[in-house]
Image: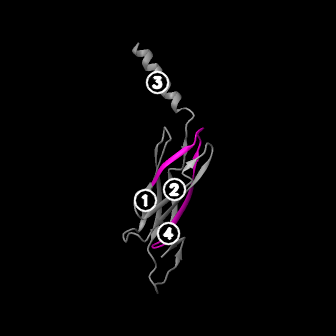
């Protein structure tokens, strides 16, 4: 009898999650290179590959220097939303070189209810006024 109950419970669980929402978004994004103090901006598509609407509960970031907005927060089946991410390279004095920040999307996707997207950006020091610069083989000095 336990075997029958276990099989039925497994079938019921699979049947309830079949045909639900299914989030699809890149989990890594390179924002390129910015000069210290300039913003880095990225826009990504968040898709719902499922058969039911995807309800996004929250969008958050790993640091106050990064803002993220998703429009709309309810994505219809086969629909998409735009995720806009803005990184303020002037927010932290120590942020020079390769910087990594995260955006978190919480939704009602039964398989991936919390998604983490890694954003990287290279922050270059602001040139000093009056300092000569030259280019050599694609680098600036």
Q: Judging from the image, what secondary structure is the residue with disc 2 in?
A: strand
Q: Judging from the image, what secondary structure is the residue with disc 4 in?
A: strand
Residue furthest to the left:
94
Q: Judging from the image, what secondary structure is the residue with disc 3 in?
A: helix
* Position of residue 105 measured from the top left corner of the image (x, y, whole percent): 47, 50
Q: Which residue is mark 1?
A: 100
Q: Which residue is mark 4?
A: 39
* Label 2 environment density (alpha carbons within 10 Å; few <14, some 14–19, many ≥20): some
72 in relation to 112, above or below: below
Q: Earlier in the sequence, mark 2 or mark 1?
A: 2
Q: Which residue is mark 2?
A: 29
**CA separation, marks 2 and 1?**
10 Å
* Label 3 environment density (alpha carbons within 10 Å; few <14, some 14–19, many ≥20): few
Quarter of the image that includes the N terminus: top left
86 in relation to 103, above or below: below
**CA separation, marks 3 and 2?**
37 Å
Main SS of the magenta segment? Answer: strand
Q: Quadrant of residue 100?
A: bottom left
Report the residue at 38% width, 69% height from top.
92
* Position of residue 110 measured from the top left corner of the image (x, y, whole percent): 49, 38
């Amino acid at each position: 009898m336990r075997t029958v109950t276990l099989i039925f419970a497994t079938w019921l669980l699979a049947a309830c999650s079949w045909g639900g929402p299914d989030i699809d978004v890149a989990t890594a994004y390179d924002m390129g290179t910015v000069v210290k103090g300039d913003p880095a901006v990225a826009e990504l598509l968040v898709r719902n590959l499922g058969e039911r609407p995807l309800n996004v509960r929250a969008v958050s970031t790993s640091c106050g220097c990064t803002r993220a907005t998703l429009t709309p927060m309810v994505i219809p089946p086969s629909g998409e939303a735009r995720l806009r991410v803005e990184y303020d390279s002037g927010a932290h004095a120590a942020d020079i070189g390769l910087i990594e920040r995260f955006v978190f999307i919480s939704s009602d996707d039964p398989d991936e209810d919390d998604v983490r997207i890694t954003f990287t950006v290279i922050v270059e020091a602001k040139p000093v006024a009056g300092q000569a610069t030259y280019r050599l083989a694609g680098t600036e000095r």
